[in-house]
Image (cartoon, rainbow, N blue to C red):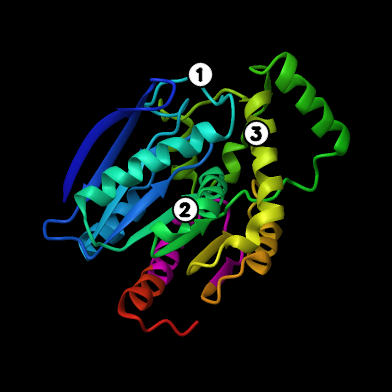
Amino acid sequence: MNHQEGSFRNAQNLQIYHQSWLPEDEPVAVFMLIHGLAEHSGRYSNVVNHFVPRGYAIYSHDHIGHGKSEGTRLYVERFQDFLDPLKTYYEMIASRHPGKPIFLAGHSMGGLISATYLLDHQDSFTGAILSGPSVKAPDHISPAIITAGKLLSKVIPKFGLMQLESGGISRDPAVVQAYIHDPLVSTRKMTARLAAELLNATNRIALEANKISLPILIVHGGSDRLVEPEGSRSFYNRIQSTDKTIRIYDGLYHEVFNEPEHEKVLKDVEIWLEKRLTGKAEE
């Protein structure tokens, strides 16, 4: 396995960190992996260790304000600040692997970023895999809180609103402890501006999800406390893909690739990928 690191500049001239894991031989296909809120691209070792030995190349970058990338932690001026680097990064990846199938894979907030990017760029990808995508605003957030958040995003945009519940990421205590003690995981509260921009993105998905028509796999933990599985079900029902699959794993928490049953989940993803690469999709 060949691990590489690098960086590029975004539209604000901030440094965006990226890394890749390449098989020894020519890859059969490429993952463009989009991480979630407060975390970073280095937290996907189970995915890397499963797929790279099977011939897949995996590329991932740290979002603005995340991990090793520059920018105010958990803050963006606009949601587009997440999307613009994807185009730059995609062009870099495609130039390194001309003609290779590229799959967009996004987790949680990365699933929302991926879904939004697909609205305008789905023709660039062979398919997409979304894990616990936060494509729907949580039902428990009242209209009053949403209104207050929008106001704060304008007057005090960097005000801290809420923090992720670390215990909700996995049922594996070792995963939770590694997350808590990871210096690249942000322990700050999500800023008001970021919260408002994420809400705007979910509203766009609600209106435009029917534009998505590429092959897509959605995986979600049935006991996910951080992102409601119903959001994935609703998204699945709205997209127009004729080749679409959703798997809700009973009892699993938010990070299905880091759950005790992750080998089962990754095998399901592997089978789905192989069918699309060989033209034998039957689902």
Q: Position of residue 243 (x, y in %)?
A: 51, 75
Marks 3 and 1, how far apart at CA: 15 Å
Q: Which of label 3 and label 2 is nearer to you?
A: 2
Q: Which mark is residue 121?
A: 2
Horizontal arrangement in the rendering, residue 134 relative to residue 152 (left or right): left
Location of mark 1 (residue): 72
State the residue at coordinates (29%, 60%): 51
> Can see residue 87?
yes
Horizontal arrangement in the rendering, residue 38 relative to residue 93 (left or right): right
State the residue at coordinates (33%, 74%): 274
Location of mark 3 (residue): 197
Q: Earlier in the sequence, mark 3 or mark 1?
A: 1
Q: Going by the picture, which residue comes out furthest to the top?
A: 156
Q: In the picture, residue 221 is in which quadrant?
A: bottom right
Marks 3 and 2, how far apart at CA: 20 Å
Q: Earlier in the sequence, mark 1 or mark 2?
A: 1
- Identify whether 274 is placed above or below 194: below
> Can see residue 260?
no
- Identify whether 143 is placed above or below 139: above
Q: Which of label 1 and label 2 is nearer to you?
A: 2
Assess whether residue 261 is covered by the magenta stretch: yes
Q: Nearer the viewer, residue 283 or 121?
A: 121
Region of the chain picked out in magenta, as a range = 245-269
Q: Nearer the viewer, residue 58 or 80?
A: 80
In terms of secondary structure, where does tag 1 sit?
Answer: loop
Q: Amino acid at mark 1?
A: Thr
Q: Going by the picture, which residue comes out furthest to the right?
A: 144
Crowding at mark 3 (Cα within 10 Å: few <14, some 14-19, many 20+): some
Q: Amino acid at mark 3?
A: Glu
In terms of secondary structure, where does tag 2 sit?
Answer: helix
In terms of secondary structure, where does tag 3 sit?
Answer: helix
